[in-house]
Amino acid sequence: MDDENPVMGLVHLLRAVTVEFDLLGAEFAARNGLHPTDVRALIHLLDAARAGQRATPGWLGEQLRLNSAGTTALVDRLERLGLVRRNRDTADRRRVLLAVEEKAMELGWAFFGPVIDEVAVAAEGFETGELETVRRFLTSVLESTGRAGSG
């Protein structure tokens, strides 16, 4: 492929950013005695909470592409570590909902807070229209990778 192509330049840059974030996630996991899948689970649960979505173990397993046994082991481990809790759904007592504990958020902010601050400062250097273009691009990439990964 032609590395001079501006589209391929973006692809390579996005890959580099992805690798850096992956390395940060692995470092966070190692420092806190977690598996990288634990970190991905916490991210999915935090994203669900921000979106107002109820997160069940089944939903989490789908997000992580884990079977039921793997999901149960993951949730058990995160619960033992005090990072996640199971709650009964008040609307349907048969359903279990997952919530991230304050301890997990504190660990995350202590490690990722400086990175988030740096990214926010970088973003402040762009105009609103430019940020909207970046958002549209990243949303499209996320949708594209989702389609490619499920095929």
Image (spheres, rainbow, N blue to C red):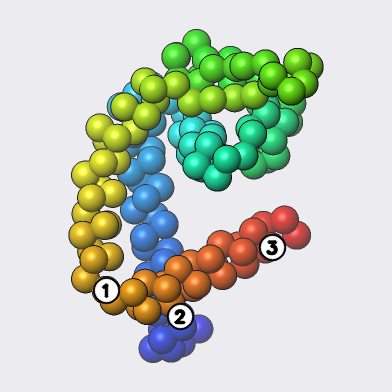
Contact between labelled residues 1 and 3, with CB atoms less than 8 Å apart: no
- Disc 2 on helix, strand or loop? helix
- Disc 1 on helix, strand or loop? loop
Q: Quadrant of the C terminus?
A: bottom right
Does residue 44 show up? no
Q: Which amino acid type corresponds to the residue marked 2 in the rendered image?
A: Met
Q: Quadrant of residue 124?
A: bottom left
Q: Position of residue 121 (x, y in %)?
A: 21, 60
Q: Nearer the viewer, residue 118 or 90?
A: 90
Q: Which amino acid type corresponds to the residue marked 3 in the rendered image?
A: Arg
User: With respect to residue 149, does 27 lie above or below?
Assistant: above
- Disc 3 on helix, strand or loop? helix
Q: Position of residue 69 (x, y in %)?
A: 72, 22
Q: Which amino acid type corresponds to the residue marked 1 in the rendered image?
A: Phe
Q: What is the C-alpha distance between the residues marked 2 and 3?
A: 19 Å
Q: Sequence-wise, which precedes: disc 2 or disc 1? A: 2
Tag count: 3
Q: Which residue is mark 2?
A: 8
Q: Which residue is mark 3?
A: 147
Of marks 2 and 3, the one in the foreground: 3
Q: Residues within 10 Å of mark 3 (few under 14, many from 20)?
A: few
- In this image, 95 relative to 134: left or right? right
Q: Quadrant of residue 66?
A: top right
Q: Position of residue 12 (x, y in %)?
A: 41, 71
Of marks 3 and 1, the one in the foreground: 1
Contact between labelled residues 1 and 2, with CB atoms less than 8 Å apart: no
Q: Sequence-wise, which precedes: disc 3 or disc 1? A: 1
Q: Which residue is mark 1?
A: 126
Q: Residues within 10 Å of mark 2 (few under 14, many from 20)?
A: few
- In this image, 77 relative to 107: left or right? right
Q: Nearer the viewer, residue 64 or 35?
A: 64
- In this image, 21 relative to 119: left or right? right
